Image (cartoon, rainbow, N blue to C red):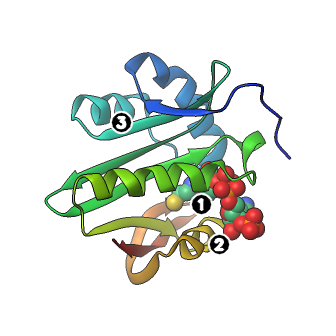
Amino acid sequence: MSAQFKEVPEIRQMRVTDIDRVIIIEQEVFLFPWTWGNFRDSINSGYHCYVFEVEGNIIGYGVMTIYADEAHILTLSIAAGFQGAGWGEKLIQYFISLAKEHHSLSVFLEVRESNFGAARLYERIGFKPIGTRTGYYPAMGGREDAIVMELKL
Ligand SMILES: CC(C)(COP(=O)(O)OP(=O)(O)OC[C@H]1O[C@@H](n2cnc3c(N)ncnc32)[C@H](O)[C@@H]1OP(=O)(O)O)[C@@H](O)C(=O)NCCC(=O)NCCS
């Protein structure tokens, strides 16, 4: 369950001043989180970095690159207390719209083999598994494979 809001959550571009708050969520939801510098570099490189904000609080964020006709969602998270309420799907749909605006032909992402919840959500949206990157992610006591997923636009 997540809180009811008086304001409608809005998706806006991530600023460097948001990173301290983004990092708190990142460290809460990922065992191997991105660093502050990873987010700063993403913003400075012109990646598509967005936050989901409501009543002054950041409840989620994501980063996507678009090169030629391919978009790639690099990371996407909703704060633990706000998961399961549809915000993740809204954020993904926002990135999909952005990719379409840029005339991308596909959106790609990687998901940990063990992250069944996220994979199920991506499949429901229309992403299809197209391959595996062996040992792509660090994991407790070793490495974990990534499932590569593609949404054709
Ligand atoms: C994956 C994530 C972004 C989804 O956002 P969300 O707001 O929780 O998802 P939504 O409420 O929009 O969609 C819910 C759907 O997500 C899936 N789902 C996501 N997390 C789940 C979980 N832990 N357990 C079960 N299903 C889950 C289900 O398919 C669910 O559908 P249902 O409600 O019909 O069962 C969010 O859970 C998250 O940040 N998780 C931790 C970080 C992460 O794994 N990021 C993705 C890396 S590839």
Could you tell which of marks 3 and 2 lies nearer the N-terminus? 3
Q: Position of residue 78 (x, y in %)?
A: 63, 44
Q: Amino acid at mark 1?
A: Met
Mark 3, mark 1: which one is toward the viewer? 3
Side of 129 where 80 appears, left or right = right
Residue at position x 39%, y 22% from top? 15
SS class of the residue under badge 1?
Answer: loop
Residue at position x 62%, y 35% from top? 25
Residue marked by disc 3 = 38
Quadrant containing the C terminus is bottom left
Residue marked by disc 1 = 140
Estimate the spatial distance between the alpha carbons at disc 1 and disc 2, rounded to whole Å: 17 Å
SS class of the residue under badge 3?
Answer: helix
Ligand 1 within 8 Å, label 1 CB: no
Q: Amino acid at mark 2?
A: Phe
Residue at position x 43%, y 36% from top? 50
State the residue lying farthest toward the right: 1
Estimate the spatial distance between the alpha carbons at disc 3 and disc 2, rounded to whole Å: 25 Å
Displayed quadrant of residue 67 = bottom left
Side of 69 where 129 appears, left or right = right
Q: Which label is found at residue 116?
A: 2
Give the answer, above or below, for where 39 lies relative to 101. above
